[in-house]
């Protein structure tokens, strides 16, 4: 084989290696995107399953007890579950824009949850009602707290790992709802000692907490939106 032929073969081989390396690198980017999408969907799906189980148990107790406080908690939990739809779609589409819109939807849902909690608390002040089945009511609150807290941990950790402000905001939303569920336990306790008036006051305090989380989540999503431009 001549020197020229060897040189040509070396150049050709080098070009093939370079081309293959570039191709491999491109595949790496696609694989990272698919992996992020899969992990995001897994986090959303797992947290949704946990919330669905908690809400199902709470619904059964609500039918038995008729507690308005528990009904408000159920509304929050179903609202929290609904945020999984746009988030899941954004991860499925692997779209940063869809993820940002999902983040705004999450913030809006947290704000609506705060409004519902506030209206329920004011209504309870105007029209006092004494809940019944207090042990079942406390159990429902603990179930809601546990489900929301676990969902919050799953979403927040995945959101930070995947650099997804929308998922972090949704984790904050689940955490807000866990506080609402804990208020149901507090309601059962204060009613048991003969202080039903404290029930709506706890509701107003929880409303303030959720409004703060709304503000913090909005800042998280807005910060991510401004950095994307």
Image (cartoon, rainbow, N blue to C red):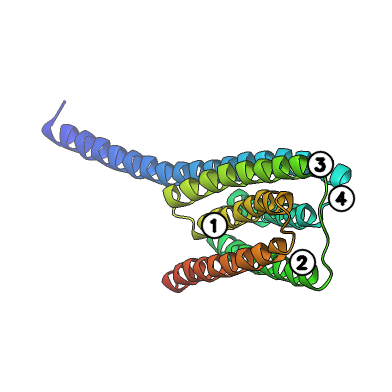
Q: Please state which of the two labelled residues, at mark 3 or mark 1, is closer to the viewer.
A: 3
- Alpha carbon separation for disc pair 3 and 4: 8 Å
Quarter of the image containing the N terminus?
top left
* Residue drawn at (46%, 46%) of the image: 157
Asked which secondary structure carries label 2, the reply is helix
Contact check, label 3 and label 4, Cβ < 8 Å: no
- x and y percentages locating residue 4 in the rendered image: 15, 36
The 10 Å Cα crowd at callout 4, few under 14, some 14 to 19, many 20 or more, is some
Contact check, label 2 and label 1, Cβ < 8 Å: no
Q: Which of 3 and 20 is in front in this view?
A: 20
- Alpha carbon separation for disc pair 2 and 1: 22 Å
First along the sequence among labels 4 and 2? 4
* Residue drawn at (55%, 53%) of the image: 171
* Residue drawn at (46%, 67%) of the image: 224
Question: On residue 111, which mark appears?
Answer: none
Residue that badge 1 annotates: 172
- Alpha carbon separation for disc pair 2 and 3: 19 Å
- Alpha carbon separation for disc pair 3 and 1: 26 Å
Asked which secondary structure carries label 4, the reply is loop
Q: Please state which of the two labelled residues, at mark 2 or mark 1, is closer to the viewer.
A: 2
Q: Is residue 109 visible?
A: no
First along the sequence among labels 4 and 1? 4
First along the sequence among labels 3 and 1? 3
Asked which secondary structure carries label 1, the reply is helix
Residue that badge 3 annotates: 61
First along the sequence among labels 2 and 1? 2
Q: Is residue 17 visible?
A: yes
Q: Position of 218 compared to 201: left or right?
A: left
Q: Position of 12 compared to 113: left or right?
A: left
Residue that badge 2 annotates: 120
């Amino acid at each position: 084989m001549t020197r020229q032929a060897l040189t040509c073969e070396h150049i050709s081989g080098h070009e093939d290696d370079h081309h293959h390396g570039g191709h491999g690198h491109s595949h790496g980017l696609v694989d990272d995107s698919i992996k992020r999408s899969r992990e995001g969907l897994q986090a959303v799906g797992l947290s949704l399953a946990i919330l669905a189980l908690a809400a199902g148990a709470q619904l059964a107790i609500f039918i038995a007890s008729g507690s308005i406080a528990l009904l408000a908690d159920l509304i929050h939990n179903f609202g929290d579950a609904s945020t999984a739809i746009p988030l899941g779609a954004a991860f499925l589409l692997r779209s940063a824009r869809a993820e940002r819109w999902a983040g705004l939807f999450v913030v809006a849902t947290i704000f609506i949850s705060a409004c519902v909690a506030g209206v329920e608390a004011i209504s309870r002040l105007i029209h006092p009602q004494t809940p019944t089945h207090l042990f079942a009511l406390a159990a429902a609150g603990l179930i809601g707290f546990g489900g929301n807290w676990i969902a919050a941990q799953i979403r927040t950790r995945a959101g930070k790992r995947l650099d997804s402000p929308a998922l972090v905001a949704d984790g904050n939303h689940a955490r807000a709802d866990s506080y609402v569920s804990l208020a149901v336990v507090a309601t059962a306790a204060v009613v048991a000692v003969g202080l039903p008036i404290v029930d709506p006051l706890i509701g107003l305090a929880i409303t303030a907490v959720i409004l703060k989380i709304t503000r913090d989540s909005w800042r998280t999503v807005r910060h991510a939106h401004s950095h994307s431009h």
